[in-house]
Image: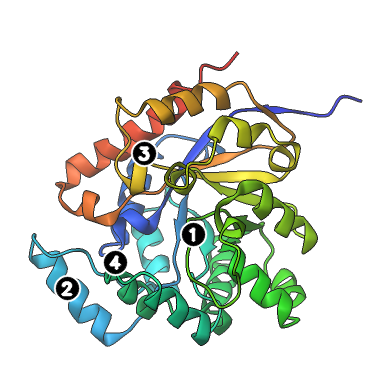
Amino acid sequence: MNKEVYTGVNKVDITIAGFLGNPKRAFEITNELNKDKPEEEWMMIEIYPILDKNLLRILSGLANKIKGLPPVPSGITIEQVHQWREELPNTRVIRVHLPFAYNKTDLWFRALGDLKNPRHFLWMYALGAAINKKGIELAQKLEELQDRKVGISAHTNIIKGFSRDGKLEEVKSAVSGSILVESSGRAKSSIIKDMSHFFDPVMVATIAEENGLDSILFGVDHAVTEEVDLEEAIEKPIVKRTIQAMHISGPHHDLIGIGDERLINFLHALGKVEFPHDVRAAIDYDPRKIKKQDASVQLETIKYARDFILNYQNKR
């Protein structure tokens, strides 16, 4: 009996990263793009477990009113998601992206390790540490709300942290959807010292399999920054068999554009790769780029990116 194979990427989702200051907007856009489509063809949403803090609420409100200010992460609660889905029924959350730091020590390593980007302090404050399990709890509540499996994604320092402390099996049993180990950019961490363990997709896939996980999320956007050979990476057997999703954007989470030859070449190659399971892409934009746009332009920006990813693959 022949095993089913899947060529390239056939579905495109979005992460809420581009809409940190106004996460409801991600639901509004996907609701519009999913109209009159069966659920299996929907663009779905990857969200962050942003903590609902008074300071964040105040700062986010100010940032949304003043155009020149950078966006501030706005808290996401299950009650909000429930309300948004009541208003916008053609929407679904596919997974929750766990915080970037494992525990408080790792959080300070991450925050202080990139002083050139002070906004990362705000990120750490907004998400806290993965050990708080808020992301896992949110995934569980979303599954109950949507009556669909909801997965999680996590950087390698998170997976290694849970594994080191004997908590990974507990995480596995708590999540019904896929647990994706994400290849990201290099970062300071109290858990990981070898930077390649963050961004090298082969190393990330190896870490996944060593910890009894069979799926990775290939951060194409980060791989470009880290000068990873994209076409070579997706042909590696361990990457092909484990990759289940990928984040795609322009360099440094910029908007996808016609002049991005490296991304176009990758998509050409991707369209010819056969995977043993369905692989989804997710548009992963810098919120500062999206905040500058009017609502109608935001919708067209996401629609353009989706069509770009699908149409440039040159499938057989």
Amino acid type, callout 4: Asn
Marks 4 and 3 sit apart, C-alpha to C-alpha, by 33 Å
Q: Secondary structure at mark 1?
A: loop
Closer mark to the observer between disc 4 and disc 3: 4
- In front: mark 1 or mark 3? 1
How packed mark 3 is, by other alpha carbons closer than 10 Å (few <14, some 14-19, many 20 or more), is some
Ranked by sequence position, the earlier of labels 2 and 3 is 3
The image position of residue 273, as x and y in percent, is: 64, 26
Pick the residue in front: 116 or 175. 116
Q: Residues under labels 4 and 1: Cα distance?
A: 14 Å
Q: Hey, what amino acid is under mark 2?
A: Gly
Kindly report which numbered mark, 2 or 3, lies closer to the viewer in this rendering: 2
Q: CA distance from mark 4 to mark 2?
A: 22 Å
Mark 3 residue type: Leu
For this rendering, which residue is in front, 114 or 219?
Answer: 114
Nearest to N terminus: mark 2 or mark 1: 2
* Mark 3 lies on residue: 33
For residue 186, the mark is 1
Q: Quadrant of the N terminus?
A: top right
- Label 3, secondary structure: give it: helix
Looking at the image, is 285 positioned above or below residue 49?
above
Which numbered tag is attached to residue 230?
none
* Residue pictured at 51% horizontal, 63% vertical: 97
Mark 2 to mark 1: distance in Å?
31 Å
Give the image quarter of residue 165: bottom right
Residue 161 shows up from this direction? yes
Tell me, yes or no, whether the two marked residues, 2 and 3, touch with CB atoms within 8 Å: no
Residue tagged 2: 61
Query: Who is closer to the viewer here, 25 or 153?
Result: 153
Q: Of circles 2 and 1, which is in front?
A: 1
**Which numbered tag is attached to residue 117?**
4
Type of amino acid at the residue the image marks with label 1? Arg
